[in-house]
Image (cartoon, rainbow, N blue to C red):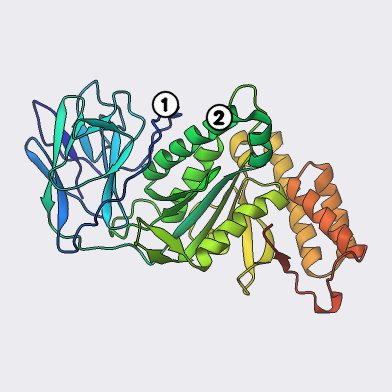
Amino acid sequence: MKQQRIDKTNPLISQSDIQDSDNQWFDKTIVGSIEMLDPLTEDKGLTLKIEYTNLPLTMTPVIIGRDPKCTLQIRDGKVSRFHAIVYRFGKNFIIRDLNSTNGVFLNGVKISAKELQKDDEITISNHTIVVTEGPPLLAGYSNECAILFYDIANSTNLCEIYGDKFLNYVKRLVETLYNKTLLHNGCPVKNLGDGMMAAFGIWDDGIIEKSPVEEALAFAIEASALPGIRDLPEIHKRIGIAFGPVTKDETDGLDLYGDTVNLASRIEFSNKLYGTAIMMDSECYDRMTDKKFLREIDKVRVQGKNAAVTIYSYDLQAQSIGAGESMKSIIERNKVYRAGINAYRAGDFQKALLFFTKGAVMKDPPSRHMKQRVETILNKKTKLTIGNWDGIWNIEKE
């Protein structure tokens, strides 16, 4: 799909498809809910019409803004770089304000997010985009995608201590996460109060610039770096990603179910155990072209899934420090952990304890967790039967 670049002097110039995202901290988004309207009929679609350009809506989101990488570029100083986005959700199209400076108006009313209907008028600065009837969609949702869960650690306790200050921060944060998800070609599926669930690669449009897993990880890295709030302790985030088939429900918007969703949720929770921030399953790992900062952590069974899953963490510390002595120490730390895991899976718990203890001294959170686990095994405080040991640990979400 070609982008449409709009201005008064040269209304239509083609550019390449959007490939990157905005890096701003969106801190002024108007929070609003989306009113669910009657779905479009299967034989009808929608088209955006602005001046000399007609842009039929497809499963590919349309980003509207001043930046040349936008799908629909409007050259106007009052239009933000990434001003708004139109995307498919359930059986309808939604327009969402991406925290623009001057807002988005739908039929004269300022909105945060709203479903579109035929004959709607979108106003951005002094530009009017008319929604007209369009061709039917030729593609649908993908049957497999990368599912991502984002959660704030210890949110209940933080809410009890800091009250509205923390709640307002979380509200703004979730709105920011929605925006950034969309700019990484992901679909925000649901707000979980102190976090969110998103799907990457769910729009089966046949256009692949970056794999869904790579987009999900890029979003996770960016989301983990979002700032906290003054006078509050450091906010720790946990992100879990899994790739696989999903079951779709378009009864009321869009919801996703199945083993992949369950696994992503369990992986997000596993960060709490291992002291990590971003984790993914082996299906994600296999789809990554750059595995430089990915580190195998464990083989586990999660509740509701019999097959063992290898889980990996993304090393934010290694990614941030670059080369030098600090990187050498991280490489050594990883070697120590790898030796501990090998001994642990072989059932040599005394040897594993030595390596994990060394890793814990090196201030490695996964080593610290594994040290405690092995001590529990050696002290016979677990139901583990050594004779049947397969090196796989069962994880149950609290």
172 to 310, vertically: above or below? above
| SS for dot 2 | loop
Classify 182 as above or below 168: below
Q: Amino acid at mark 1?
A: Lys
Q: Is residue 231 visible?
A: yes
SS state under label 1: loop
Q: Position of residue 276 (x, y in %)?
A: 67, 47
* Horizontal side of residue 206 vs 344, given as left or right: left
Going by the numbered disc 2, the residue's amino acid type is Pro
Write the residue at 86% across / 50% down. Answer: 357
From the top left corner, tell me how far across and down residue 50 is, in percent.
Answer: 11, 37
Q: How many marks?
A: 2
Most extreme residue toward the bottom is: 387
Between residue 171 and residue 160, name the one nearer to us. 160
Snapshot quadrant of residue 338: bottom right
Write down the residue under mark 2: 227
Q: Decide if residue 113 is on the left or right side of residue 28.
A: left
Question: Image quadrant of residue 129?
Answer: top left
Q: Residue at x 8, y 26 (%)?
A: 9
Residue at image mark 1:
28
Q: Position of residue 243 (x, y in %)?
A: 49, 62
Q: Residue at x 71, y 41 (%)?
A: 328
In primary-sequence order, the first of circles 1 and 2 is 1
The alpha-carbon separation of the residues under discs 1 and 2 comes to 14 Å
Q: Quadrant of the C terminus?
A: bottom right
